[in-house]
Image (cartoon, rainbow, N blue to C red):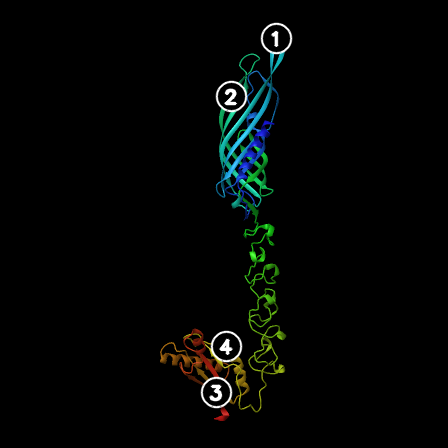
Amino acid sequence: MKVLIAVSFVLLSVTSWSQQDTAIHLIPVKHKAYEPHSVIATAALGFIDGYRNSYSVPAGFTKSNTSGFAPVPVKLEYGFTDHVSIAGTFCYDAFTYNLAQVYEGNNGPFTRYITNNTRIFSGGISVFYHFRRLLPTYRFDPFIGLGLSINNIRYSQYPQGDSTTVKIDHSVTPYLKAGTRYYVSDKFSLYGDLGYDKHAIVSLGFSVRFAKNKYILDSDGDGIPDNVDSCPHEAGLARFHGCPDSDGDGIPDYADSCPHQAGLVQFHGCPDSDGDGIPDREDSCPHQAGLAQFHGCPDSDGDGIPDYLDKCPFLAGPIENQGCPIPAEQPQKQLALPISVIQFQFDKAVISKSSMPFLDDVVVLLHSHPDIGLYIDGYADITGKAVVNKRISLARAESIKKYLVKKGIEPSRLITVGHGSQSPVASNRTRAGRAKNRRVTLKIEDSRTK
């Protein structure tokens, strides 16, 4: 009864102190467990009593019975940081030994019985290290503690004969414990530890936390408490009620058909890389703007045959000739090329791979009309000296001629001219403009008009 009154007094005292804090702040935390700058009161029952087991029986006596209360540890703890707390540790321990001693009397041997009453009150100070922020423990708060306890021991002593006297003694013992709390709620937790404090090798009980701040579980650590978080186990954004937007396209993952690719609202979060109005996941040519009838693939020459099936994608032709034009017996006087500009990198005359399909179509056209030729005009931007620009522009035109000759076109049908930086098609003040001016243009030359 005295033990329960003492524990109640400690808890009521701490409760009275905490009620002075009238402001309550709701602060979401990643793990509902030990928090700094809060007070935690713990009451428990101890098992495997170190003092009781180490009691020395006086000479000539034997133990006939042992009884008493289980040790009652109490701890009042204050957190300094996320990991470290300091605690006052207390324990009340009481037990009784019934001792028996055999005597030889005048009438033969007889047994006398003496009762030994022991009461121990201990108090000490300990430092605890908490592992909550090192482990994803959520409701658990594992810890280790180290300190000292001063023990006030009142017990019965046997001087002479049948009488006993009361003796008070003191001792200092180490306190070493490892254990954990499990938070059932923000205030209440279950407690258990294992270690050495002379009284109790094992302690089981409960803890009550008193704090100005009320901490609410935020399992994913996104700053949004679980009770208002629509996705409590995925870090997210407040605008989406705690749900994530992994690709940052403004569409939460749960409503995004392509959650890891930034996309458009009209395509439920999926991208349209080539901007042809067909989302990439339904587009057979996602990086080339095309037509819906060809599943997003282009038809550059508009002959109704998609480029990937068209042998001459830049020259209109019938399907029976695989998209290439049929050679005419009497070629028309005026012929036009669908694309006639080839651009080059700065200070280079190397044909880009993207220009090869177009040049191959030019080869088909020249083979189909053997009486026509090409004017191949090379240009440069304004960067550099005029003589250098003249030379690089001609080199670009010659690179095109060399490619066509390699494909079987007679050199006499190809006329190359280098114009340097003359006749710009865009401003040379911008990078984009200079890139357009580094070019080669092709123009059909009808030999019949000579």
**Residue 151, how many percent across, how many down?**
51, 27
Question: Tag 4: Cα neighbours inside 10 Å, few (<14), some, or many (≥20)?
Answer: few
Tell me the element at label 1: strand
Question: Tag 3: Cα neighbours inside 10 Å, few (<14), some, or many (≥20)?
Answer: some
Q: What distance separates the C-alpha of mark 4 from that of mark 3?
A: 20 Å
The answer to which of marks 4 and 1 sits earlier in the sequence is 1
The residue that appears at 59% across and 59% down in the rendered structure is 253
- Name the amino acid type tagged 2: Ile
Q: What distance separates the C-alpha of mark 3 from that of mark 1?
A: 146 Å
Q: What distance separates the C-alpha of mark 2 from that of mark 4?
A: 103 Å
The residue that appears at 57% across and 47% down in the rendered structure is 216
> Is 285 placed above or below 319 here?
above
Query: Would you identify the image quadrant in which residue 346 lies?
Result: bottom left
- Name the amino acid type tagged 4: Ser
Query: Would you identify the image quadrant in which residue 191 lies?
Result: top right
Query: Would you identify the image quadrant in which residue 418 lies?
Result: bottom left
Question: Tag 2: Cα neighbours inside 10 Å, few (<14), some, or many (≥20)?
Answer: few
- The residue that label 3 is drawn on is 413
The answer to which of marks 2 and 3 sits earlier in the sequence is 2
Q: Which of the two marks, 4 or 1, is nearer to us in this view?
A: 1
**Residues at circles 2 and 4 in contact by the CB criterion of under 8 Å:** no
- The residue that label 1 is drawn on is 105
- The residue that label 4 is drawn on is 355
The answer to which of marks 2 and 4 sits earlier in the sequence is 2
